[in-house]
Image (spheres, grey):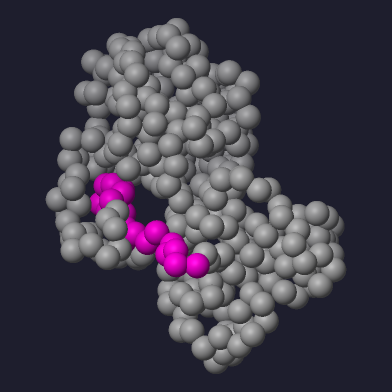
Amino acid sequence: MRILAVANPTLDLAAGEREVIALKELEGEGSQVVAGGKLWTSRYLKRLPQREWPKYRYAVCENCERYQRVIADSDEKLDVCDSCGMPLKGKSRGTFIVPEFGFIASRKKPKKVGESRPERAYSTRSYYSGECDKDNERILNLKSNIVLKAISASHGKMSAINHAGHQRFKVCNWCGYTVLGNEKIEETHETVLGSPCSGKLYKYDLGHEYMTDMLQLHFEGYSNPDIGFWHSLLYAILEGASESLDIDRQDLDGCLYPTGGDSSTQSILLFDDVPGGAGHVKRIAQDEDTIVEILKCTLSKLKNCNCGGEGGDASCYGCLRNYRNQFCHDQLNRVVVIQFLEQNIP
């Protein structure tokens, strides 16, 4: 993010860092980030002469969670899910801008950083586009006639989209002035140089697309219509893999990807949360024994948690919950994963 201020007119922070990092910071009130020991407010999407931000229309199926996107100005339709055939409707659709030229801070002087971090909701979601280069496949026979197929791939195309809690961002197409969708603003605003701008503000989400290493886990022969089960299994395996292989949990993430046009047969997608990949998911799928050990570690971690009492019908920040999966906290349940793994780990 580039910072313009009276005291330091051209301080350039984190030059060359991926846009997805910035997107994940634009969550709090006023889109505030901590840098250089001060609290800065991101206020502009940087523009370049005769260049436009890439814009895409997108939709996430409410039935199976399949993600689809098309170029904003194209005539392509986003009416029906390519996976399950259900109509694409609801709040999980819109248009996102890719702020590929960066961000610029407010002209106002930064505030001092407080002792405690302000509480805020996490509103950036990652989705798999369906595009990748398959590397290899491991087959693991589980109990109950379930076959676990672990398919590793490189150059998996991911999309990270920040919808600001579904209130979106209001963006000026002329100067890049940007505020949260619920912020009250005056009729006119200033450009990054301080001159008045009469450009209109339009509502967008902010997004970024990147390639990374990924691992698809498909439980062939098993189906479950409860999307909460799949989210619980996803985040349980992420925790188990992190602990078993000593991987920083912040370097791993995951999402669901429907297979076979059926919302009850989800694939669990694990990916390196680093553009280009860091090799973490390749370690997970290095051999069948490693996968089994991760499943056992996952089961042990869940059974050692005390949330929900003896029944375990709950989740907490010690087992499944984290800052980034707030969108499904009410769905996460450790006991359903415990039962599944106890019945099926060989």
> Which residue is the extreme one toward the left?
85
Task: Tell me what residue is drawn at x 33 percent, y 32 percent.
Answer: 132
Indicate the quadrant containing the N terminus: top left, top right, bottom left or bottom right. Answer: bottom right
Q: How many marks?
A: 0
Indicate the quadrant containing the C terminus: top left, top right, bottom left or bottom right. Answer: top left
In x, y percent, where is residue 13?
71, 52
- In the image, is residue 32 above or below residue 242? below
In x, y percent, where is residue 77?
18, 61
Can you tell which quarter of the image residue 27 is in?
A: bottom right
- In the image, is residue 223 above or below residue 134? below
Can you tell which quarter of the image residue 79 is in?
A: bottom left
In x, y percent, where is residue 40?
73, 64
Decide if residue 221 is in sight here: yes
Task: Tell me what residue is drawn at x 81 percent, y 60 percent.
Answer: 38
Magenta stretch encompasses residue 74 = no
Task: Tell me what residue is drawn at x 54 percent, y 75 percent.
Answer: 175
Decide if residue 228 is in sight here: no
> Which residue is the extreme one toward the bottom?
187
The span shown in magenta is: 49-68
Can you tell which quarter of the image residue 179 is in?
A: bottom right
Task: Tell me what residue is drawn at x 28 percent, y 51 percent.
Answer: 68
In x, y percent, where is residue 341?
41, 22
- Left or right: where does residue 232 sit relative to residue 219? right
Near-viewer residue (157 or 99): 99
Near-viewer residue (38 or 86): 38
Near-viewer residue (99 or 65): 99
- Left or right: where does residue 177 sit relative to residue 259? right
- Type of secondary structure dominating the magenta stretch: loop
